[in-house]
Image: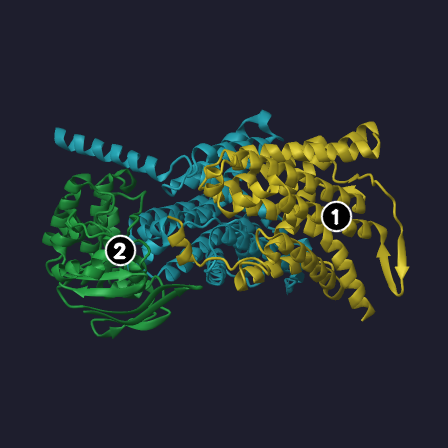
Amino acid sequence: MDDYVVTVLSNIGMISFIALSAYLLLITGEISFGQQAYFGLSAYAAGAATSMFGLPIWAAVLIGACTAGLMAMAVGALTLRLSGLYFSISTLAFAEMMRLILLIVEVQVEVDGEMVGPDGANGFHDIRWMFERDISLTEFMLFIYGLLALVLIALLLVERSRLGSVFRMLGSDDLLTEMQGLNTVRYRILAAGMAGAIAGIGGALYAHFTTYVEPQFFNVMLGVHALAYGLIGGLGTAFGPLVGVAIDIGFLEAVRFIQGYRMIVFGGLVAVLLIFMPRGILDEERVHRLKALFSRGNHARAERH
Amino acid sequence: MIDFVQNTVDGIMFGSSYALLAIGFTIVFGVMRRINLAFGATIMLGAYAGTWLHVHYQVHVLVVVLTTVVCTVLVGIYVERLCFHAVRRDAALASMVSSFVVWMQLEEVAIHLLPERTYSFPSLIVAGSFELGPFLLRGEQITMLVLAAVMVGALHLLLHRTRYGLALRAISESPRAAAYMGIDAAWVMLCAFALVSLVGAVAGYAILATDEQITPFFGLWATFKGLIAMMLGGMGSLPGAILGGLLLGVVEAHAQWYLGNEYKDLSAYVLLFAMLVLRPGGLLGQRILGREELAFRRV
Amino acid sequence: MLALSGIEKRFGALTALTEIDLEVASGDVLGIIGPNGSGKTTLLNIVTGTYAPSGGCISFQGTDITGWKGHRITRLGVARTFQNIRLFPTMTVFQNVWAAQHSRVSGGLLGLLRSTPTRTRGEAGRVEKVLEQVGLLRDREVLARNLSLPARRRLEVARTLAVDAKLVLLDEPAGGMTPAETADMARLIREVVAPGRTCVVIEHKMALIAGVCTRLCVLDFGRKIAEGLPDQVLADAKVREIYLGTEDGLDA
């Protein structure tokens, strides 16, 4: 594979994390415009872990995910009272706040005679883990997809469990969920933390793939895309956001004449989709019908044998 | 002390433009209980159309003003039809997301129209600055303040002295009761969008003329400043929008002066986030309902 | 079982409930009747912790639960249905009942993650048994939003059965139903819900009240104006006047 294809595929993989993160919040009934903040925060934390403190990559990913997850839980606790529009705007405000803070932060240490670390508006350069270990782009891409597969499987398992059911209950009816004896506060914060951590894994990978990060990359555009992927793909299953990513990057990137008009097409597409399918292509009803179809197929086969 | 007063005065002057932008958000929210995130981009595309004529055909400034206003209103109507009229009644969040993606769409159209980073923007009147005691006042900013006062006055009259204003207020109180009274909500809302776009276009023109330039970041800037000002003051409240705008202007001016340039925008977001956490309804808005009360009302 | 003393609730200037004293003994089926807006649903909301009372206190099985959060009260064994039916519309009938058991799972977060309906046979069995009792077993894979109104009300009842509640609060369980459907609901309450549980039923329909209640309580403008055995209460002249406004028979 040539480097261009590997880069595009890696980008799809890394963006998928933030799409999954937005999706997890969407099923609990919250629209977040700010998941890019956790992506960015983790990129900085993980980048610092390898380049400034010489930690291995798995530790960096873990540190990134935990930092992002804890921050998301703290923000979640602060914004618990808010719902709907207010919550969405608060996530937007927080994300922009984080971005502007990262523009100011300058923490540099000397490593091997060079200054390394976040350098305010200049970004965070020289996260050279890939070069130092002599890791090829393709190998790193496989690493990205390996982690993505793990996260996806974990999410699918959660969805089948009672916890997934609790998340969907929260998204559907807050009060009724409480009336089932569940502490909604706890599960809201938990969902926020999980979503933050998932975005964080993507961010940690991103920092090491591109070798430098700058706050400008984590602007609202990234958050909007993540959210749109979740909404296009559908809220019925964790595969939904991946479908959304595939439609945007896979389809629109591939069709050459759309180049340069991409946002016009994408924006129009999402706007029209929201009119006809407000809960996305793979929404709960369709997923339910698909499942019924499959299980009926299984029954039929079982009877034949 | 002189610095402090000068900053406050500057902040109020600047804040008046935020207030005008906030009015656009607050009227839409008051009537529809929805947020139009594409508002800034709408104004930007209108202003880009005017600038395009200015750059390519060197038309008279008045033509630029007129084009800006007309195009902004047309784009506003497009946004209303696509993101608000067509989206289901109960899907306020879908409308917001939809207006967010349409914002990106409008921005790209504007960049295709004029691909460079900055263009000079023609000013209608040239007013110098003058001194008042130890303080410096800029002519454009005074124009802005006067403009804001006049528009707020006109809007107030429109809302409280005309039949249309009555219909608008009726819908914001109770859409269903208004419908029983024979008010065509769809039409009133379309008109509200046109009206808001008009206000936005005039505000946008005045701001851009003060800056004497236009960049593709104007949409983002206008949306965020207007939104923050509205949320500070209280959603859906006209006096709140003005108060929020002025407060935002003053806080930003002081942050910039005492902390430095990079803290100006940061202070705005910190203020907004803190307000949402501590007093979500804004300064003059109603206390918002808690989750549980909301859950009971939703049915 | 449940004791309310001096309960008051004000919403701003509006006083919804004044000085309510009420005792529900174990095994009772208490009917609460009263005109619209007399505070019946508000009373239920106070018992379940949705609203905090402005004054007075509530105790359940000797525990003072005044001001407790809703989920804690539910865990003590209080379950309810809603006047304007609340279900999880995009979940199936089975999942709706299953959802009611989430708070009973032991082992905290891990417990929630471990159990899926296919893995734990016992759970699925219990849900199915409850569905059979309310007559919804055939519809177990139907999405709740596609059910008919009587079926949705039955599903709400099923949810209260699934958690082994000690106290079941039913808010107009026969609202919007035809006489035949109301009779079915009355039978369900009498034969399935009431045995072994204490119930509070809010209802307008005399067919249901007369068929299931062992005691009656009448609210008017947020005050309790009568309480006692159904026959006595319904014969009370004051009740007849405020409830029906005329001297015509109650069984009309």
Which chain does green denote in the image?
A: C
Look at mark 1 in the image and give the residue it sits on: B150
Q: Residues within 10 Å of mark 1 (few under 14, many from 20)?
A: few
- The amino acid type of the residue labelled 2 equals Arg
Residue found at the very far top of the displayed protein: A257
- Up the image or down, C129 lies above or below A259; here it is below
Task: Please tell me which residue is depicted at 57% across the width and 61% down the height of the picture.
Answer: B275
**Where in the figure is residue B52, as x and y percent of width and height?**
76, 31
Q: Quadrant of residue C24?
A: bottom left
Q: Residues within 10 Å of mark 2 (few under 14, many from 20)?
A: some
**Where in the figure is residue A114, as x and y percent of width and height?**
67, 60
- The amino acid type of the residue labelled 1 equals Val
Q: Colour of chain B?
A: yellow
Decide which of C86, A135 is in the foreground and name it. Answer: C86
Residue found at the very far front of the displayed protein: C247
- Up the image or down, C189 lies above or below C46; here it is above
**Which subunit holds the residue at mark 2?**
C
**Which subunit holds the residue at mark 1?**
B
Give the label, 1 or 2, closer to the camera. 1
Q: Colour of chain A?
A: cyan
- Say whether residue B224 is left or right of residue A192: right
Q: Which mark is residue C114?
A: 2
**Where in the figure is residue C240, as x and y percent of width and height?**
21, 56
Secondary structure beneath disc 2?
helix
Which corner quadrant holds the C terminus of chain A?
A: top left
Q: Is residue A133 visible?
A: no
Secondary structure beneath disc 1?
helix
Q: Is residue C14 visible?
A: yes
